[in-house]
């Protein structure tokens, strides 16, 4: 009787210390997550006074310690790899314990669960295995591991504290050594013994951290979880697999654990912790993760990767207000950032969403590890130890049940039909929020196929199939069934495939062996598969999510082998080839608006550090949008779901990623995106390309368009094929006929083309038509506004729109070259013809070779390009189009000096043209004498099929005479435009020469195309 009374008094005293025993819950989630929590239906609770059991015989107990809710933290082995990290984690505990003092007036009692120092558990397991064959070596390895841990304590703790750590570790090492000698004699290691030895890493880690805190004057102690945590084994013995995501193997026994914890706190030696003045500091308890004990007191573990489970169990035992899992990333990401660089941290998750993500391989928490916090409604925070200022991810609250969602949807659907409106999804989304929370995957999966013939009922087949898999303990990850022929395919771990195949073949061997009326046609295994899954509560009853997911796979060229959706509609999973898993992840991530729609861009053209060029200007325009994706920079992640970045592309929801640049001398390739603003990018490109380097995620390859166009273009094409993103645009900034030859292939492969290359639009009619046919058959787009007149003036698109709306074009006349118009205009102001040409070349108004302008070859191609857009216009070829050249006969055969250090091509050409300045001056004077100006005019007549280019003297009042400077003027006569009563012809006029204008025209085509690719196929109103 006396012992029972004593035990009762001891328990009552412990209850006064252990928070939550007869204590009301308190402490809200972090203020930084208030908005996110409210959006997910989480009720934020302000800290409130808490009552506790206070037996009258307990004098001197600090009431605040008994009443302020605890917070629990967990540190993994990677966070404790070095002495400096032990100090960082310990100091983090101190700062976190004081975080709420400005608002609630007290510090927060803190408990930390620690794993073994990085690599120690593996070393201990290796020591045990080594002992079976070499006892001496295993003892040596044990001494090394123990000495390494002691060295950490010596570096961070006081001499006295470090001496105590060494004493404890040496004693443990002696005990382990005795076990090793037994293992040598037995030549085997019992599973229970391996669990005992492997758990010492956590013990040593806990006493090491406690030694630092005590040395700093912090009221701290350490707790061996084997003295408190009682568990029962449910999944078999042994440690389990490292990183396991499917089986935990142990369950906590709450009642005995609570009693033991109360007894541990009641020990008199811990009275100093109970008397801490929380207004200045808080007690900190360091607990060993991973280890526990059975009801019989036998040491055991929570299996490999079980320290998170330890943390959530103690959070529930302590009735903690929150638990923080400290990782090396800024929370739970929308996808694995190692495979999807565009991934970014999720602000908040429901427990159900986190469980789905974890089941399909996401590095969140094990589903079983979340169970204690789910049952006790304790929010879990995932934060970055190396970036503690980042709020991380909060996991809290439950998703709507399937029954609740189903009832809500049925009622809403009925109301919507009655009110003649679209039904609203039961789960509301925030502005610009995606219905999914993340994309994840499971690698190393195999498909088990059981092919029926329709003669066996699906009920019988599935019953027998799952019975045999249960008997052989083969877990099934995914199921897809066709009831018509009683066929079924299952996703299983690849390691289980041989065993599963043998078992299922044995089960159905009589049916397979039948000669006639076969009920089963075969059982087979397909290895090397992966499961890609999207997860999110917002998917439930929201039309379009699955369609967008599968369309993303199609755009990326990923074949779907099987598909399944959970009954809760919180996840959809696809089976794909393992080699295409990363491509599938990135495609799904982009398509489902976890990031804005990404457009992969390949730029082909001449770019250098020293000279300005149109493609260089185009890259600058792309960078200036603020939507450039490159390694380490993701505009969508920066913005998240609510923040607003100033950008010229606001509202378009697109990001631009330059994945390839083909230059004259080298090629730059990167699936993660090239930072075109990177200082010295072009200056360093040549050297890196010669060495074949990969730098900052960019692959540099020698041999550009000049050195070997075919090999360069083949490299770019291969890169495009491998790109995960189906939204691919090739921007051809050249006038290279070899590049134009690739259009048909690129369009057929599913890439879109934006071009100013007139070799494609005005080359042979056969090639032009082949490109158009490839575009139609592949459902791709080819935009080439800058190949026509105006360098981006909306001439070609206007002609297309006019005819598609029923208008008929009769004829076109105009000034088709801003360059020639500038030169002729300058001569009317008294500038010599040769000097006007030099100035135009220096200012970038001409083509790369100014002779293309003066020979009128460029204008001939523009005129042919325009003619091919007119319905009913006779076929034109550039080489048969009549034109008047501005390049004298004698100069046409001239070869410029291309050696290093030679004058620019424009300057050399000006010298060749100088003898002809007087002749041009005479022609100008003759025109001016008749109140006319010289214009280079192009004409097209759809009725007669005639076309041509020539210098004409037009009156100063003529529409074309008003075309000045670098402008183009295009005059269109059609059914709608031309008659005086309709207001006259349609006139398109504007500047049309220069790198900047042409680059902007090219970018306009890119945006026009991107708008069609940036589809949001999940209706936001639902």
Image (spheres, rainbow, N blue to C red):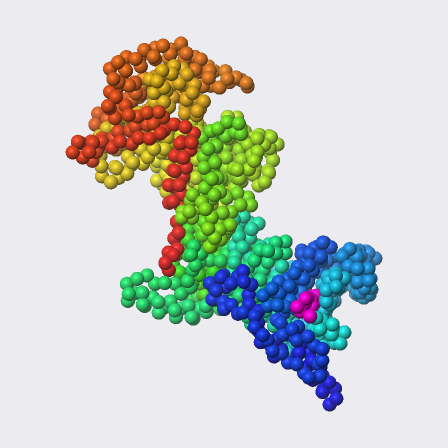
- Residue 955 drawn at (x, y percent): 24, 20
Which residues are drawn in magenta? 277-292
At a point 52% along the width and 17% down the height, the residue shown is 902
* Residue 240 visible in the snapshot: no
At a point 29% along the width and 29% down the height, the residue shown is 970
Is 977 or 801 nearer to us in this picture? 977
Is 703 or 506 nearer to us in this picture? 703
Label count reads 0
Instruction: Determine which quarter of the picture holds residue 1000.
Output: top left
Is 666 or 824 nearer to us in this picture? 824
At a point 67% along the width and 62% down the height, the residue shown is 94
Q: In this picture, is 446 found above or below 666?
A: below
- Residue 484 drawn at (x, y percent): 40, 61
Quarter of the N terminus within the rendering: bottom right
* Residue 53 visible in the snapshot: yes
- Residue 42 drawn at (x, y percent): 49, 67
Is 98 or 288 nearer to us in this picture? 98
Horizontally, residue 938 falls left or right of residue 190, namely left
Instruction: Residue lying at the far bottom in this picture: please name it.
Output: 1
Q: In this picture, is 913 found above or below 507?
A: above
- Residue 935 drawn at (x, y percent): 30, 20
At a point 38% along the width and 16% down the height, the residue shown is 831
Whether 783 is among the magenta residues is: no
Quarter of the C terminus within the rendering: bottom left
Horizontally, residue 302 falls left or right of residue 736, namely right
Instruction: Determine which quarter of the picture holds residue 418.
Output: bottom left
């Amino acid at each position: 009787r006396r012992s029972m009374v004593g035990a009762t008094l001891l328990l009552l005293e412990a209850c006064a210390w252990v928070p939550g025993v007869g204590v009301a819950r308190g402490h809200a989630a972090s203020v930084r997550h208030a908005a996110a929590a409210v959006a997910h239906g989480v009720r934020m609770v302000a800290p409130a006074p808490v009552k506790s059991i206070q037996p009258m015989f307990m004098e001197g107990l600090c009431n605040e310690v008994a009443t302020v809710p605890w917070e629990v933290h967990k540190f993994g082995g990677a966070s404790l790899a070095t002495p400096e990290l032990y100090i960082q984690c310990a100091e983090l505990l101190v700062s976190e314990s004081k975080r709420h003092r400005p608002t609630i007036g007290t510090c927060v009692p803190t408990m930390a669960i620690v794993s073994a120092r990085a690599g120690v558990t593996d070393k201990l397991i290796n020591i045990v295995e080594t002992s079976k064959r070499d006892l001496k070596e295993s003892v040596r390895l044990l001494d090394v591991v123990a000495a390494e841990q002691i060295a950490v304590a010596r570096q961070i703790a006081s001499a006295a504290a470090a001496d105590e750590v060494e004493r404890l570790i040496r004693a443990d090492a002696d005990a382990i050594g005795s076990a090793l000698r037994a293992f040598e004699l037995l030549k085997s290691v019992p599973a229970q013994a391996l669990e005992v030895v492997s758990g010492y890493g956590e013990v040593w880690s806990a006493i090491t951290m406690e030694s630092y805190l005590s040395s700093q004057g912090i009221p701290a102690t350490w707790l061996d979880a084997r003295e408190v945590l009682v568990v029962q084994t449910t999944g078999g013995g042994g440690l389990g697999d490292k990183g396991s995501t499917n089986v935990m193997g142990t369950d906590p026994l709450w009642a005995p654990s609570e009693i033991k914890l109360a007894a541990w706190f009641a020990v008199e030696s811990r009275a100093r912790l109970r008397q801490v003045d929380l207004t200045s500091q808080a007690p900190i308890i360091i607990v060993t993760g991973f280890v526990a004990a059975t009801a019989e007191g036998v040491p055991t573990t929570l299996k490999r990767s079980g320290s998170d489970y330890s943390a959530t169990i103690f959070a529930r035992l302590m009735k903690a207000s929150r638990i923080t899992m400290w990782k090396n990333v800024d929370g739970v990401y929308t996808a694995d950032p190692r495979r999807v660089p565009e991934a970014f941290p999720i602000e908040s998750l429901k427990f159900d969403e986190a469980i789905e993500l974890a089941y399909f391989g996401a590095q969140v928490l094990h589903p079983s590890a979340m169970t204690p916090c789910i049952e006790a409604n304790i929010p879990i925070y995932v934060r970055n130890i190396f970036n503690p200022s980042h709020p991380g991810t909060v996991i809290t609250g439950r998703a709507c049940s399937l029954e609740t969602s189903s009832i809500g949807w049925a009622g809403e659907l009925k109301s919507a039909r009655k009110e003649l409106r679209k039904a609203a999804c039961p789960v509301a989304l925030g502005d610009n929020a995606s219905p999914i929370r993340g994309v994840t995957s499971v690698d190393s999966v195999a498909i088990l196929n059981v092919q029926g013939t329709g003669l066996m009922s699906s009920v019988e087949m599935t019953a027998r199939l799952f019975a045999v898999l249960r008997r052989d303990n083969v877990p099934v990850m995914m199921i897809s069934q066709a009831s018509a022929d009683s066929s079924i395919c299952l996703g299983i771990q690849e390691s289980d495939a041989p065993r599963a195949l043998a078992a299922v073949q044995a089960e159905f061997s009589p049916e397979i062996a039948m000669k006639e009326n076969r009920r089963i046609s075969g059982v087979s295994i397909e290895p090397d598969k992966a499961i890609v899954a999207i997860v999110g509560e917002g998917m439930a009853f929201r039309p379009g999510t699955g369609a967008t997911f599968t369309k993303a796979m199609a755009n990326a060229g990923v074949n779907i082998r099987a598909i399944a959706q959970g009954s809760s509609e919180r996840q959809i999973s696809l089976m794909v080839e393992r080699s295409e898993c990363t491509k599938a992840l990135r495609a799904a991530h982009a398509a489902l608006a976890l990031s804005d729609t990404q457009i992969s861009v390949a730029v082909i053209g001449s770019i250098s550090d020293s000279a300005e060029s149109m493609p260089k200007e185009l890259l600058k325009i792309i960078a200036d949008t603020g939507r450039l994706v490159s390694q380490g920079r993701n505009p969508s992640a920066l913005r998240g779901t609510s923040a607003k970045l100033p950008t010229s592309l606001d509202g378009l929801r697109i990001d631009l990623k330059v994945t390839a640049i083909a230059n004259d001398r080298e090629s730059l390739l990167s699936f993660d995106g090239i930072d075109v603003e990177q200082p010295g990018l072009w200056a360093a490109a040549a050297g890196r390309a010669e060495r074949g380097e990969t730098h900052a995620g960019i692959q540099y390859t020698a041999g550009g368009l000049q050195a070997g166009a075919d090999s360069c273009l083949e490299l770019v094409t291969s890169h495009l094929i491998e790109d995960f993103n189906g939204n691919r645009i090739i921007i051809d900034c050249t006038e290279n006929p070899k590049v134009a030859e690739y259009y048909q292939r690129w369009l057929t492969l599913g890439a879109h083309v934006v071009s100013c290359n007139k070799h494609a639009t005005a080359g042979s009619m056969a090639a032009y038509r082949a490109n158009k046919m490839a575009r139609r058959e592949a459902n791709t787009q080819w935009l080439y506004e800058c190949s026509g007149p105006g360098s981006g003036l909306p001439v070609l698109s206007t002609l297309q729109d006019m005819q598609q709306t029923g208008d008929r074009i009769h004829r076109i006349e105009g000034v088709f070259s801003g360059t020639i118009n500038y030169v002729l205009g300058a001569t009317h102001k008294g500038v010599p013809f040769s000097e006007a040409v030099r100035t135009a070349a220096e200012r970038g108004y001409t083509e790369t070779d100014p002779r293309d302008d003066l020979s009128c070859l460029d204008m001939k191609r523009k005129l042919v390009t325009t003619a091919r857009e007119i319905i009913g216009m006779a076929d034109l070829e550039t080489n048969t189009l009549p034109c008047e050249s501005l390049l004298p006969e004698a100069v046409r055969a001239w070869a410029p000096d291309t050696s290093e250090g030679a004058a620019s091509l424009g300057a050399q050409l000006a010298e060749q043209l100088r003898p002809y300045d007087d002749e041009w001056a005479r022609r100008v004077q003759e025109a001016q004498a008749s109140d006319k100006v010289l214009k280079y005019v192009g004409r097209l007549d759809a009725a007669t099929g005639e076309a041509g280019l020539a210098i004409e003297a037009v009156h100063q009042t003529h529409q074309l005479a008003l075309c000045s400077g670098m402008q183009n003027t295009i005059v269109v006569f059609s059914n709608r435009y031309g008659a005086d009563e309709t207001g006259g012809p349609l006139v398109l006029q504007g500047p049309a020469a220069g790198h900047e204008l042409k680059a902007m025209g090219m970018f306009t085509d890119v945006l026009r195309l991107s708008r069609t690719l940036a589809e949001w196929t999940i209706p936001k109103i639902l």
